[in-house]
Image (tube, helix red, strand yellow):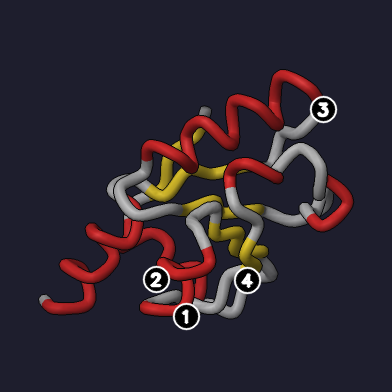
């Protein structure tokens, strides 16, 4: 599994590199704060596989990076993904990065 830091993600976003953001948190968490990612809760990630790009980098995130790690493991175990990145520390770290 490949991890990405908040700083690296910010660089990707600022460079306008085509990426997909996938939020595996629950709706109430996504509604409170999000970075524009497609909401696919962890419980339904393998059922909504057709929504996850196989051609561009996909950054998967959650609150702390644990659920996104699990989501990537599930996807990589069932499907031939090689373009998934786990946001280290999730939205908690992203908020800290923005506060700098």
Local SS, label 1: helix
Mark 2 burial class by Cα count in 10 Å: few <14, some 14-19, many 20+: some
Q: Position of residue 22 (x, y in %)?
A: 60, 59
Disc number lying in front (2 or 3): 3
CA gap, disc 3 and disc 4: 22 Å
Residue 10 circle label: 2
Picture quarter with the C terminus = bottom left
Determine whether label 1 and label 4 are within 8 Å by CB.
no
Q: Earlier in the sequence, mark 3 or mark 4?
A: 4
Mark 4 burial class by Cα count in 10 Å: few <14, some 14-19, many 20+: few
Disc number lying in front (3 or 4): 3
The residue that label 4 is drawn on is 17
Q: Earlier in the sequence, mark 2 or mark 3?
A: 2
Q: Position of residue 59 (x, y in %)?
A: 56, 54
The residue that label 1 is drawn on is 14
CA gap, disc 4 and disc 2: 11 Å
Residue 10 left/right relative to 44? left
């Amino acid at each position: 599994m490949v991890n990405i830091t908040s700083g690296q993600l910010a660089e990707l976003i600022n460079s306008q590199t085509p990426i997909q953001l996938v939020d595996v948190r629950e709706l109430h968490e996504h509604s409170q704060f999000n970075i524009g990612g497609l909401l696919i809760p962890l419980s339904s990630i393998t059922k909504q596989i057709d929504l996850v790009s196989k051609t561009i980098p996909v950054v998967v995130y959650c609150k702390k990076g644990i659920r996104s790690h699990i989501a990537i493991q599930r996807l990589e175990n069932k499907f031939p993904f090689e373009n998934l990145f786990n946001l280290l520390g999730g939205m908690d770290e992203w908020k800290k990065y923005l506060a700098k």
